[in-house]
Image (tube, rainbow, N blue to C red):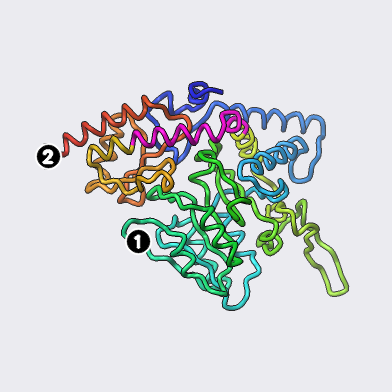
Amino acid sequence: MNKEEYRKLFYACNHCVYLDQAYDCGSTLFGIKAMEKYFSDWNNAAVNVERGGPGRLSHFIVADETRELIRRLVNAESADLIAFTRNTNEGLNAILQGFEFEKNDNIITAEIEHESVFMPALRAAETRGIEVKVLPTRKDEKILSEELIALADENTRMILVSHVQSKNGYRIDLEKLGNMCHERGIYLIVDAIQSLGLEPFDMRKWHVSAVNAAGYKGLNSVISIAFTAYSRELLRKVHPTYVAAGFCTDITKTKDGWKIICKDEENARKMENSSLDNPGIYVLHDALEIIFERGVENIYEEIMKLYEKLYSGLKQLRYPLITPENGAEHLGIIAMKPEDPQKMFEFFRSKNIALSRSSKIYIRVSLGGFNNEDDIDYFLNAAEEYAELSKRQY
């Protein structure tokens, strides 16, 4: 599939200059078709009295195929280490609330982290009796692996970090951090919602113990579906907080009374709370197939090339860029800290450009695999016009 064929699948690209992949991917033509297939399969299952537990057999088949696609995407050890969730935050909460923490244990995260990472860590401190060590925000807003590790001690069990920061676009070197964690026996828990689908990801090579992501950004799916991919070592030590009838859980009666049992502690389906978001899984399934057809490596190379042009143009126009220029420290997001974020936002919206205000103080432009040079040229022309207008007013 070439670039233009891929681009035509995204509704927003046909109606505006869409530079907001970090917010979501917008509706897709293949997503609509996937939903139609879901209902078609459900209709056939009902008519043919198809069974399959809380779902239908055809739905289970698509779910299993999707687990395998996710396994390929993140290079997980096996598909049975993939659990479906509703969102990234749910996956992180499940790990923190279900892990076998001991007295005096601590976890580490950073002050600048997205609330979906920071809040589960703080809640775990309240409910699990652990300490949360928080890395203060640097002036340059980077999160350095060395500084995270410097906070660790013999009681540190986990480091929680985003692969790419949603607010400022900073990308941490996961391989470097993962190697440090591996040497210290620390589990590295990653929110990869701003990177998966946009660049290759290798959880085994990088010693990532769990990667969480939702499907509605770089994975081009819908907002209701997400997943966690576990390492087998971590999964053995995480137990479900919410339980219901499912593939891995059951009820038994012993001489001491009724008990919930887990039939397979090394299967991530133990973490799934009964019925799944089958419509979302259908869309994610087709979205991943199309990403693989397009090629994650191709998407990454194209984004980085467009990013360089965009960054260079904004730098020349003297925009207040926050995201590092170094290619190893960014991916698809360029964040700016203007004096009047709302005014800048409204100007670009008046030019039919989709972008975001982030955390009230940032203007965030973000690239997807569907963007092309025409998008960048159009945006930079508008940026030049805004810069001229601002000069006249001041």
Relative to 155, residue 353 above or below: above
Image location of residue 104, percent across then percent down: 57, 78
Q: Who is closer to the viewer here, 297 or 383?
A: 297
- Residue visible at 57% across and 74% down in the picture: 155
Question: Which quadrant of the figure has residue 258?
Answer: bottom right
The kind of residue on which mark 2 rests is Gln
Q: Report how far apart the C-alphas of labels 2 and 1 lie in the structure.
A: 33 Å
Query: How many numbered marks have been drawn onto this rendered protein structure?
Result: 2
- Residue visible at 43% across and 59% down in the picture: 144
Describe the element under mark 1 as helix, strand or loop.
Answer: loop
The quadrant in which the N terminus is found is top right
**Classed neighbour count for the residue bearing mark 2: other residues with Cα under 10 Å, few (<14), some (14–19), many (≥20):** few
**Residue that protrudes farthest toward the bottom in the picture:** 103
Q: Which residues are magenta?
A: 289-310
Q: What residue does disc 2 label?
A: 393
Residue 20 lies in magenta, yes or no? no
**Residue that protrudes farthest toward the right in the picture:** 255
Q: Who is closer to the viewer here, 256 or 323?
A: 323
Image location of residue 378, percent across then percent down: 31, 27
Residue 298 lies in magenta, yes or no? yes
User: Mark on residue 138?
Assistant: 1
Image location of residue 314, percent across then percent down: 28, 38
Side of 143 where 209 appears, left or right? right
* Dot placed on the residue nearer the N-terminal end, 2 or 1: 1
Asked if marks 2 and 1 touch (Cβ < 8 Å), the reply is no
Describe the element under mark 2 as helix, strand or loop.
Answer: helix
